[in-house]
Image (cartoon, helix red, strand yellow):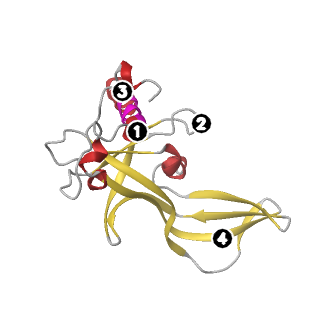
Amino acid sequence: MKKVRKKCRVAIILCMTAVLLFGMKSDLYAYNNDTSKGVVAVVFWVENLVYCANVDGQLMPLSEDRYDGAWTGGSAFFVGDTSRNPQYLVTNAHCVWYYVESGEGGAGCISLGVVDGIDMYVYYESCEIRIYYSENDYDVAEVIDYGSSEEVDLALLKIDSPTSKRIALPLYVPTEDMVGD
């Protein structure tokens, strides 16, 4: 397990380097080869979500209505061997934080803050991370590793099997001439 976590941390460092490089010289980097072919939407999907209020230390549902759907989202890009169908993605850690907090798929509670003097929350019974290729075409991903939102804000995800729906974006090792560019 330690070897796997070490490899994941190395992968996150490499991916972080790639993120830093994508906005650089267009004649050298991946987006010159149509980066959109490697990018997807990453969605924190919840099931049986209900809005609640904290009443005397207990969460009380505000209605009987339940919600299944996207709660938050962001973007991700596939990484890996560019000659093969990709299976791993990099996204921001804050995009998967609620999922990680829920025990990776379990129930969770999200504070919405104080509204009209009442502590408001949403409670959901289960959740997953979905990788959307289009509106109704998605895969479910697992979180392999992640950094803190304050320090690294990157997460490494994996779908069950490699996909032909996107390509892996090439990663580049930084060179001295890139510093400050």
Q: Position of residue 179 (x, y in %)?
A: 43, 23
Compared to residue 178, the image places residue 76 above or below, namely: below
Indicate which disc, 1 or 2, sits on the residue closer to the N terminus: 1
Residue 19 - label: 1
**Residue 147 vertical placement versus 167 (above, below):** above
Q: Amino acid at mark 1?
A: Val
**Vertical arrangement, residue 17 with respect to residue 75, above or below:** above
In which image quadrant can residue 75 be found? bottom left
Q: Nearer the viewer, mark 2 or mark 4?
A: 2
Q: Earlier in the sequence, mark 2 or mark 4?
A: 4
Residue 51 tag number: 4
| Left/right of residue 141 with respect to residue 101 in the rendered view | left
Identity of the amino acid at label 4?
Tyr
Mark 3 and mark 1 residues within 8 Å of each other at the beta carbon: no
- Chain-order first, disc 3 or disc 4: 3
Give the residue type that dot 3 points to: Val
